[in-house]
């Protein structure tokens, strides 16, 4: 067992990061996917994650949402989400705590994962009504505003099977936003889309960056998009951050050889 | 005389058989009701994080599926009293047939639940939906259409298995036909009628299952 006393019960101070990975290790069985990851994300910061397939990009997001970790602590807004306080120390969180602690985090997936038996509007209302306990009316109002924001208000009564990929992804973004998250996670949200509809999704994300003070962590294969909107880009390799920095620096003047190789491979593939 | 059909006898026994049909339908309906609910319990309890529970339920389901229904009926009815549980033929019959089919239905549910893409679970977890709501509101509604064909087959199956209850004296169709036969020494008419009645009941059941499947799919918006 890891000695937990080295991790604070809570992060305090003037500029506590919105998300903070402290020495996080994640393994599936004997396969270590992320090793001793330290990563801080400021409130309102847009961080892109790039890297080769299997380097652990998705895993970084999943640890904030869906997975348990083997070592380290993750803090959101200063509070641990992977652990809870017990007798003055940190112990692994139980399911109930985890669910509560992860409420301020929203996630969008490569394959949208909308609920097929609900309309676009019902998809958006599900969380606010069932989890936040909002009235149907308030949830409907909020959801309609968000569907308006993503440009899907005229399709609000359609089931996902009647929507294109780009439209489904925009509804999925509205559904995540309906929970009023502080942190949004995007995992290759444009990878399953036809090229001509990628723009409608990236435009929504750009709008969120410009108009909302959301903290975002985005895995993407679209280097141009990442360069455009990120405050910082992290290049992952073999379960570690190989290099990170502002987009101009990382894309135009990468320091590490692996970063250079990766970027030139991606460029020649385009 | 090889084939000696007597219409007067047919009309005479028809009312008795029709009222026995009501018992057959009642037995099938009640047994199916038990099986539907218990089957879901068996399927869900194999998905809990408790390994031991999963193992025990799994073995129980296998055991039920690999032993004959008639043995299970005898077991509940005759062995029950020896350990102090005295049940009427009806109650024992319903328990046995309900239990038997719950094992089969749990396998249908299991397949249906497994057919729901893992992304749906992830979406629920991203919304912090509780496990209970995840099942009731998201997973089960989507699993249902995939379960319908199997559920329909077992509804017809349970109907056709109700004659087994005659062995412990439940007055369903078969039992009544046997009784008529041993009173009158005529078997042709009662057994033929029983066959026709089963046909008349099963055929629309299969049709109804198909119609309700389409209705549910449309209602849920999944095709
Ligand atoms: N549920 C799991 N069980 C076992 N191994 C897993 C699981 N999920 C991911 N892995 C492994 O973890 C490693 C990192 O996976 P991850 O999905 O984070 O990669 P990625 O960087 O997102 O790749 P891609 O660009 O292909 O999406 C891979 O080697 C993968 O095989
Ligand atoms: Mg990935």
Image (cartoon, coloured by chain):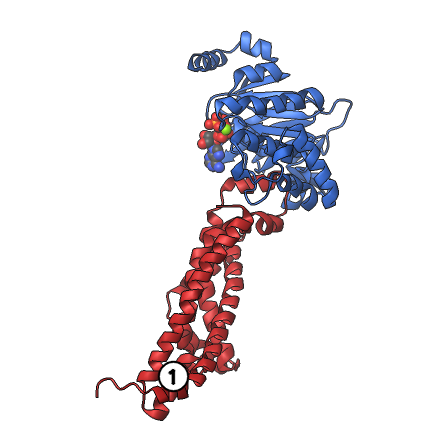
Chain colours: A blue, B red
Whether residue A30 is visible here, answered yes or no, is: no
State which quarter of the image contains the N terminus of chain A.
top right
Q: Quadrant of residue B164?
A: bottom left
The chain under label 1 reads B
Q: Residue at x 48, y 73 (%)?
A: B25
Rendered view: A220 above or below A59: above
Of all residues, the one furthest to the right in this rendering is A14
State which quarter of the image contains the C terminus of chain A.
top left
Q: Residue at x 72, y 34 (%)?
A: A9
| Of residues A158 and B106, the one drawn nearer to the viewer in this rendering | A158
Rendered view: A184 above or below B133: above
Q: Position of residue A123 (x, y in %)?
A: 62, 40
Of all residues, the one furthest to the left in this rendering is B1
Q: Is residue A187 left or right of residue B193?
A: right
Of all residues, the one furthest to the top in this rendering is A253
Report which residue position mark 1 lands on.
B177
| Of residues A171 and A179, the one drawn nearer to the viewer in this rendering | A171
| Of residues A59 and B92, the one drawn nearer to the viewer in this rendering | B92
| Of residues A77 and A125, the one drawn nearer to the viewer in this rendering | A125
Rendered view: A174 above or below B57: above
Q: Position of residue A252 (x, y in %)?
A: 54, 7
Q: Position of residue A69 (x, y in %)?
A: 57, 36
Q: Dot 1 lies on which element?
A: helix
Whether residue B133 is visible here, answered yes or no, is: yes
Neighbourhood count class around disc 1 (C-alpha, 10 Å): few under 14, some 14–19, many 20 upward: many
Q: Position of residue B114 (x, y in %)?
A: 47, 48
């Amino acid at each position: 067992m890891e000695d937990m006393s080295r991790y604070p019960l809570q992060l305090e101070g003037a500029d506590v990061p919105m998300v903070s990975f402290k020495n996080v290790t994640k393994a599936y069985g004997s396969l270590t996917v992320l090793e001793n990851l330290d990563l801080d994300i400021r409130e309102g910061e847009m961080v892109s994650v790039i890297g080769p397939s299997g380097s652990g990009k998705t895993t970084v997001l999943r640890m904030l949402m869906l997975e348990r970790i083997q070592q380290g602590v993750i803090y959101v807004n200063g509070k641990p989400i992977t652990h809870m306080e017990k007798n003055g120390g940190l112990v692994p969180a139980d399911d109930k705590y985890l669910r509560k602690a992860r409420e301020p985090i929203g996630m969008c997936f490569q394959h949208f994962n909308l609920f097929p038996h609900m309309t676009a509007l019902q998809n958006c209302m599900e969380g606010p009504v069932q989890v936040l306990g909002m009235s149907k009316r308030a949830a409907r109002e909020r959801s309609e505003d968000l569907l308006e924001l993503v440009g899907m208000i005229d399709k609000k009564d359609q089931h996902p099977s009647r929507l294109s990929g780009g439209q489904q992804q925009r509804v999925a973004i509205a559904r995540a936003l309906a929970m009023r998250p502080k942190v949004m996670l995007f995992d290759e949200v444009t990878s399953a889309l036809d090229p001509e509809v990628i723009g409608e999704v990236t435009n929504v994300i750009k709008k969120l960056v410009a108009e909302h003070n959301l903290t975002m962590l985005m895995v993407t294969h679209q280097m141009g998009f990442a360069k455009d909107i990120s405050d910082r880009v992290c290049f992952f390799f073999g379960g570690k951050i190989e290099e990170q920095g502002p987009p101009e620096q990382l894309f135009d003047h990468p320091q590490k050889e692996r970063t250079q190789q990766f970027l030139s491979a991606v460029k020649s593939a385009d | 005389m090889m084939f000696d059909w007597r219409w007067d006898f047919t009309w005479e026994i028809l009312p008795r058989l029709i009222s026995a049909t009501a018992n057959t339908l009642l037995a099938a309906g009640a047994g199916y009701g038990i099986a539907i609910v218990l089957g879901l319990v068996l399927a869900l309890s194999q998905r809990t994080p408790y390994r031991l529970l999963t193992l025990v339920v799994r073995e129980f389901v296998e055991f039920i599926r690999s032993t004959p229904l008639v043995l299970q009926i005898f077991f509940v009815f005759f062995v029950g009293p020896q350990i102090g549980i005295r049940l009427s033929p009806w109650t024992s019959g319903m328990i046995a047939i309900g239990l038997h089919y719950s094992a089969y239905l749990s396998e249908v549910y299991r397949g249906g639940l497994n057919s729901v893409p893992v992304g749906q679970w992830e979406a629920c977890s991203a919304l912090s939906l509780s496990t209970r709501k995840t099942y009731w509101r998201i997973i089960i509604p989507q699993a249902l259409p995939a379960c319908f064909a199997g559920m329909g087959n077992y509804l017809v199956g349970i109907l056709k298995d109700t004659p087994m209850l005659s062995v412990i004296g439940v007055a369903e169709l078969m039992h009544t036909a046997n009784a008529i036969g041993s009173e009158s020494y005529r078997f042709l008419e009662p057994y033929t009628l029983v066959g026709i009645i089963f046909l008349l009941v099963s055929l629309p059941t299969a049709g109804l299952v198909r119609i309700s499947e389409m209705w549910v799919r449309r209602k849920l918006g999944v095709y």
